[in-house]
Image (cartoon, grey):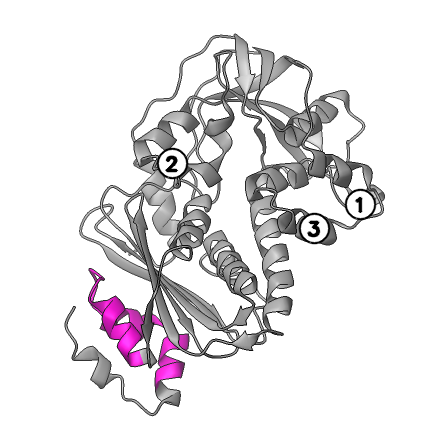
Amino acid sequence: MLRTKNAYLQKLTARLDMRSVEVGQELDGSTPPSVFIGSWNYPQVYAGPMMVPQQKDSYIMDSPESWIPQHKTQEDIISYRLALVRGKKRIGINDLENVYVEKLQELSLSSSSIDSEATFNKPPQGLSFSEETTPHGPSAILEKFNIDNVKWDRELEKVFYDTDLNSRQALTDLHEKGVSFSSMQKAFSVGTMGIGKNRKLVPTRWSITACDSTLANDLCTKVRNHNILDSYRVYEFSSLNNYYAIILMPTEWQYEWIEAFIRVLGKEELIFTDYENNCGKKEYSRVGGCYYTSKMAVLDALHKEKKQGGSIVIREAYEGYIPLGVFNVRENVKNALQQSYREFEDLKSALIYVGSHLKIPLSRFIRKSDLMKELLRSKQTTLDAYFKHKN
């Protein structure tokens, strides 16, 4: 019996049968730009670029913010990602004076794809799927790596040269200026922001959650100062074999993430949840990075509207679903909140509406929930009144 989300997704990714691009020991191509820093053997990590073996504009291959608006399919995204070859070298996280690391920093600051050349110690092999990071194709140790001239993104360049600006403020400033999350995260991971003496390499999966949680914490502070919503709202969105329902509530900030995986591996119907009240969350979420990236997207939408509210985010993943990284959650939630919404007078009406669109009965989500049950009890409404509604 798979009792944790991590165990379930590990089993799911282990069963994927796919092929990545085949390349030899030499590669003449481009990088989107894209960098990847592993976490194994930290603080000595494997860091390097990801390159496509063709000299072309490859920016779309590591630009997750554009995939859903451009209606890219799951197959499109997997095709992009498995065409990326990961080169790597073992580097200490504080070794930022290294010429190789400086090349990775240049990549992370670039505003466009860059022609690149690489020589590996052997032909790259394998592929990688993860619940946290986007997939990539084969990998191998780099012997040589060269790039053409790089044109830096102006806002990222300013942050790079400001060695007195802490990383928290750098991230919030970049977000307010509209710099994409993926660009910020890559720059953060290769040590291009923060107080000079504190800069270091950060493994990619850690840097994603660090950026999401940093932005979410800043946005939460701001949202708590806004007026509270005056009604219940439901936003919906479907893509990449997922359905999302986002309920915004006329309360102080509180938040619950509830996700179900339905017959993805076989006959399973698994639900995982986590939540926080107005005081926030101290321990790391039991459902992983998707908790923070969804929270950040919801708070960002509330702050843009200058409103405060509570939120319940429900996600169902269906047969054919493949883990593509937490971008899948961030971008789906963001796009959901850009749609028109349905308005309701109370939580009961909102939940009954959402329940009519779910494949798992609403009662099962409520039983697994912490926040929903608390809110329903606070309204002096019995759960049985909800369970009797059929989806």
Point 27% across, 78% down: residue: 349
Whether the magenta-drawn stretch holds residue 373 is answered as yes
Relative image position of residue 325 (x, y in whole percent):
44, 42
Relative height, residue 153 to residue 1 (above, below): above
Relative image position of residue 305 (x, y in whole percent):
52, 64
Point 20% across, 78% down: residue: 387
Residue to which mark 3 is pinned: 173
Relative height, residue 353 to residue 388 (above, below): above
Residue to which mark 1 is pinned: 198
Identity, as a three-letter code, of the amino acid under mark 3: Asp
Q: CA distance from mark 2 to mark 3?
A: 27 Å
Element on which disc 3 rests: helix
Q: Which residues are magenta?
A: 348-376
Whether the magenta-drawn stretch holds residue 263 is answered as no
Viewport quadrant of the N terminus: bottom left
Q: CA distance from mark 1 to mark 3?
A: 19 Å
Residue to which mark 2 is pinned: 70
N-terminal of the pair, mark 1 or mark 3, is 3
Q: Is residue 207 left or right of residue 246?
A: right
Residue 203 seen in the figure: no
